[in-house]
Image (cartoon, rainbow, N blue to C red):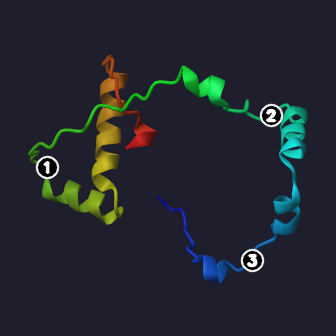
Amino acid sequence: MSETVTRRSLKEAGEGRTDWKRIDSQTDAAIDAAIAADPDAAPVLDSDWFSDAELELPERKQAISLRVDADVLRWYKAQGPGYLSRMNAILRQYAEAHGATLTGRTPASG
């Protein structure tokens, strides 16, 4: 991975370019009209939508003991935090590529 990540605290970032006074002064009706006029906007999730919603939690990961070559483990650890989740994602992709029908977590959800 050759991505460069620059981290800044909210204090370092300053106020930004958002016109918070304009945002805060908008009425609910104006916000609803703007959403209705935007063809790319997601639908409003109101109480009717949530009345049929069901909470489904992904299957929990299982703790195991796995013997891995030391150099392979060093390489993954050198990639930074989340290396075990990345190893899991790679194993998942391999299994799916070889015909496994997996449920539960997706590679993006870690």
Residue 57's disc number: none
Estimate how packed mark 2 is, as few (under 14), some (14 to 19) or many (20 or more) residues with alpha carbons within 10 Å: few
Considering depth in this image, is 69 or 66 the residue closer to the camera? Answer: 66
In the picture of the structure, the residue carrying the numbered disc 1 is: 68
Considering depth in this image, is 63 or 27 the residue closer to the camera? Answer: 27
In the picture of the structure, the residue carrying the numbered disc 3 is: 15
Label 1 sits on what residue type? Val
Answer with mark 3 or mark 2, whichever residue precedes in sequence.
3
Label 3 sits on what residue type? Glu
Considering depth in this image, is 87 or 27 the residue closer to the camera? Answer: 27
The answer to which quarter of the image holds residue 94 is top left
Side of 49 where 62 appears, left or right: left
In front of the other: label 3 or label 2? 3
Estimate how packed mark 3 is, as few (under 14), some (14 to 19) or many (20 or more) residues with alpha carbons within 10 Å: few
Instruction: Check disc 2 and report its element: helix, strand or loop.
Output: loop
User: x, y percentage for residue 26?
Assistant: 87, 54
Label 2 sits on what residue type? Asp
Between the C-alphas of marks 2 and 1, the distance is 46 Å
> Please, which residue is most extreme toward the bottom here?
12
Between the C-alphas of marks 3 and 1, the distance is 47 Å
Between the C-alphas of marks 3 and 2, the distance is 28 Å
Instruction: Check disc 1 and report its element: helix, strand or loop.
Output: loop
In the picture of the structure, the residue carrying the numbered disc 2 is: 40
Answer with mark 2 or mark 1, whichever residue precedes in sequence.
2
The answer to which quarter of the image holds residue 34 is top right
